[in-house]
Image (cartoon, rainbow, N blue to C red):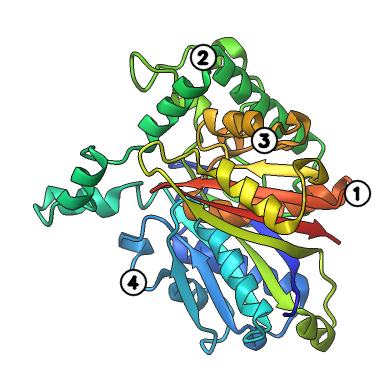
Amino acid sequence: MTEAYIVDAVRTAGGRRNGKLAGWHPADLGGEVLNALVDRTRIDPAAIDDVIMGCVTQAGEQAFAFARNAVLASRLPDSVPAVTVDRQCGSSQQAVQFAAQAVMSGMQDMVVAAGAESMSRVPMFSNITLHQEKGIGTGPMSERIKVRYGVQSFSQFEGAEMIARKYGFDRETLDRFALLSHQRAAAAIRAEVFDAEIIPIKIESPEGVEQHVQDEGVRFDTSLESIGSVKLLRSDGVISAANASQICDGASGALVVSERALKAHGLTPIARIHGLTVTAGDPVIMLEEPIRATRKALERAGMKIEDIDLYEVNEAFAPIPLAWLRQLDADPEKLNVNGGGISLGHPLGATGTKLMATLIHALRARGKRFGLQAICEGGGTANVTIVEAL
């Protein structure tokens, strides 16, 4: 079986809801990532075997073969195929894993794994609520599922509260983690560490044209007091909008290739795929699955958590990475070293390759070798990818 290499990994800077990226059609935003990967690697775009693109809310402007529309909105020739993946928050991480599997099988040599999501233009859950408002269908959960699990719906918000209760995380603990996320992201921006991974997006406004190159959601002057003042999502809970991931617009992508493609196109890899794992578990508590997935990933790779130099564990809600740290006995100084979804935003379908870009570039900048990325996902699934920086 051949190896799978990543030649480049890029992302847009995040845009806040109705912020700087809200004027961009999501297909065009995805197209910009495809253009950037071609420009930065100088590959012949016609040599791309496939584009696999994550997107969660596939409705409206993100409907109807969204990945294919991103290709048509790019400078790639229309001979390049594309497919859209929905594994909820891990959609574009799964795109990386599908791309790697295609390359490792020997069936394809050059695949783009990417993701795009405009949470401003296609609001979260609108693919469900718009049908409900029109009286079409009964929703994604059948009566059989409700009876099996004894709930009327699966809620990520409730899952996060359940994890906080299970592990005894009070609000102050979660808020302190949120503060650290903003502090690390702010420090990373000041040190210009994201420059290697962020592609500029042109923004036109009445004031003129600018290049969007800085994550819009980072609060440079936030404090524990200001985070603690945000209203709880449930009066008897501990989760607030301030210790959960930010709604975000963005796109990201990575070019995954075989050794044959490296030689044929004169490419230099920045990372090698070292391990691919996906697991599933309890859909009610839902967001705890990265713990089991990480254990399985490490076992399959013949590694221990101490062998990993940096971790990216998606900050969907603060209890998720905190529970992961505790159960894996992992080093908090290696976790989300440049901030995470609480500060930088969580653009759903784009988050997987966004975190991959950040992880690989952070490993290379620090002269480190192995990185592990884990994402909790709706329905109780989780992806874990281990990469080796080159």
The nearer-to-camera label among 1 and 2 is 2
Residue 367's disc number = 1
Callout 1 secondary element:
loop
Who comes first in sequence, dot 1 or dot 4?
A: 4
User: In 3D space, how far apart are the residues under numbered discs 2 and 4 (Cα atoms)?
Assistant: 43 Å
Residue 193 in the image: state x and y as whole percent: 79, 44
User: In 3D space, how far apart are the residues under numbered discs 3 and 2 (Cα atoms)?
Assistant: 20 Å
The nearer-to-camera label among 1 and 3 is 3
Neighbour tally class for label 3: few under 14, some 14-19, many 20 plus, Cα within 10 Å = some
Q: Identity of the amino acid at label 1? A: Gly
Residue 78 in the image: state x and y as whole percent: 51, 87
Query: In the current view of this chain or complex, which residue is farthest to the right?
Result: 367
Closest to the observer: 176 or 17?
176
Neighbour tally class for label 1: few under 14, some 14-19, many 20 plus, Cα within 10 Å = few
Closest to the observer: 103 or 166?
166
Who comes first in sequence, dot 3 or dot 2?
A: 2
The residue under label 2 is 170
Who comes first in sequence, dot 1 or dot 2?
A: 2
Q: Identity of the amino acid at label 3? A: Leu
Callout 2 secondary element:
loop
Q: Residue at x 49, y 30 (%)?
A: 244
Q: Residue at x 75, y 46 (%)?
A: 194
Residue 64's disc number = 4
Q: Identity of the amino acid at label 4? A: Phe
* Side (left or right) of 40 relative to 65: right
Residue 249's disc number = none
* Side (left or right) of 125 relative to 49: left
Q: Are marks 3 and 2 in contact (CB under 8 Å)?
A: no
Q: Which quadrant holds the C terminus?
A: bottom right
Who comes first in sequence, dot 2 or dot 4?
A: 4
